[in-house]
Amino acid sequence: MTLKAVDARRLVEYVCERTHSFFETELAIPHSHIEFHFSDVQRLTLDFLTSILAVEGPVRVMFAMSFDRELAEYSTAKYTEELEIPKDELYLYLEETVADIINIILGNSLSRFQLEGETITLSPPVVITEAKNIYRHKDAHFFTADVKTKMGRLQIFCIGPRELFDCKLDYLQEEL
């Protein structure tokens, strides 16, 4: 099943519902404003840290969560509040936190999207630390949600089809 055949809007909405719930219960972020972009998205702009997962099975897409610095640091502080972290290891904890967050949120969200008799699997998360732009080629589809909180900003990207991209969201072929 291709990205065009599934209801990408519903899939992104499930992820945003779970994100909102996770922020409230696990990170004590009381309110988030979510703005969806489901059509004519031409460019993705990655922020401070971006965690990426490949979704395999009947739905083959990439999901990315791009954290601004403030939200990544706040999330890490909440995750590690009972630990003493050496300053030289802080960046490792930042990366582990954003990887864990996408894993939890997508795992819970995609269980709502299970299709009869089909299994959906997730790749291990990959974290990229570079801000970059990804421009949409003609065969690619981008669906996004911008989540704004008092603690920072998170961008959620659903990108497909999966076959066009490597694990760092680079196109596998130059121009399709």
Image (cartoon, grey):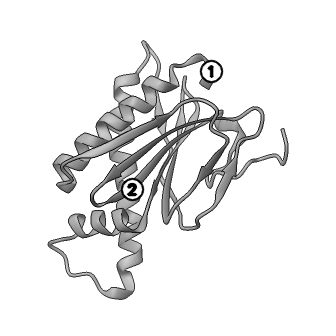
Q: Determine whether, in the image, residue 174 is placed left or right of residue 68.
A: right
Query: From the viewer's perspective, is residue 154 above or below residue 2?
Result: below
Q: Which amino acid type is marked by label 1?
A: Lys
Q: Quadrant of the N terminus?
A: top right
Give how far across and how far down residue 48 sits, in percent.
49, 66
SS of the residue at dot 2? Answer: strand
- On the image, the x and y values in percent for residue 16 come to 36, 37
Q: Which mark is residue 149?
A: none
Mark 2, other Cα within 10 Å: few <14 / some 14–19 / many ≥20: some
Q: Nearer the viewer, residue 7 or 68?
A: 68
Taking 145 as reference, is 44 above or below it? Answer: below
Disc 2 residue type (three-letter) = Arg
Q: The C terminus is located in which quarter?
A: top right
**Marks 2 and 1 close (CB-CB < 8 Å):** no
> Residue at left 38%, top 64%?
96
Q: Secondary structure at mark 1?
A: helix
Q: Is residue 2 visible?
A: no
Residue at (54% x, 27% y) in the render: 57
Sequence-first tag of 2 and 1 = 1
State the image quarter where residue 41 is shown. top right
- Answer above or below: position of 117 versus 20: above
Q: In this figure, which residue is indicated by the disc labeled 2?
A: 153
**Residue position marked by numbered label 1 in the rendering:** 4
Marks 2, 1: nearer the viewer: 2
> Picture coordinates of residue 139 (x, y %)?
75, 32
Count the labels in the image.
Answer: 2
Q: Residue at x 68, y 45 (%)?
A: 165
Is 121 in front, or is 170? 170
